[in-house]
Amino acid sequence: MGRIGHARDAVRYVPLTGREPEIASVAPAWIITFEGALPMPKSGDVWMDPICIVVGGTGGYYATGPVQIQSSGVTVTPLPAGEAPSLALPPLLP
């Protein structure tokens, strides 16, 4: 988890496509990365290695790995990142 100065720079820190609505902003953003399977509360679907981005109190989750759709048993793969991230998220202050 880390805070970056401009949401539009998120693609430099995490594997996103660049089309995510939250990152179309120059406002600061909190980014939380998850490793492993994360059941999504509303749908029950299971996402692998998702990312949560919050900008100005509005946020969303984005799949970076396979997503298992529980209602059908189908597994889908999200669009690939535009390019590989080149920076690590800044550390949280103590």
Image: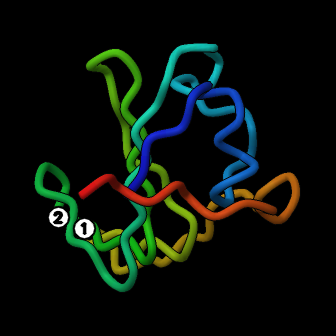
Farthest bottom residue? 36
In what element is the residue under mark 2? loop
**Residue 71 in the image, given as x and y percentages of width and height:** 24, 67
- Residue 21 location, quadrant: top right
Residue at image location 35% in from the left, 69% down from the top? 69
Crowding around mark 1 (Cα neighbors within 10 Å: few <14, some 14 to 19, many 20+) is few
Report the quarter where the N terminus lies: bottom left
**Residue 25 in the image, given as x and y percentages of width and height:** 61, 14
Which labelled disc corresponds to residue 44?
A: 2
Q: Rounded to the nearest whole Å, what is the CA distance between mark 2 and mark 1?
A: 8 Å
- Residue 89 location, quadrant: bottom right
Residue at image mark 1: 71
Farthest front residue? 94
Viewer-side residue, 41 vs 50: 50
Report the quarter where the C terminus lies: bottom left
Viewer-side residue, 25 vs 76: 25
Check disc 1 and give the amino acid type: Ser
Crowding around mark 2 (Cα neighbors within 10 Å: few <14, some 14 to 19, many 20+) is few
In what element is the residue under mark 1? loop
Check disc 2 and give the amino acid type: Gly
Q: Mark 2 and mark 1 in contact? Answer it, CB < 8 Å.
A: yes
Residue at image location 38% in from the left, 48% down from the top? 52
74 horizontally vs 87: left or right: left
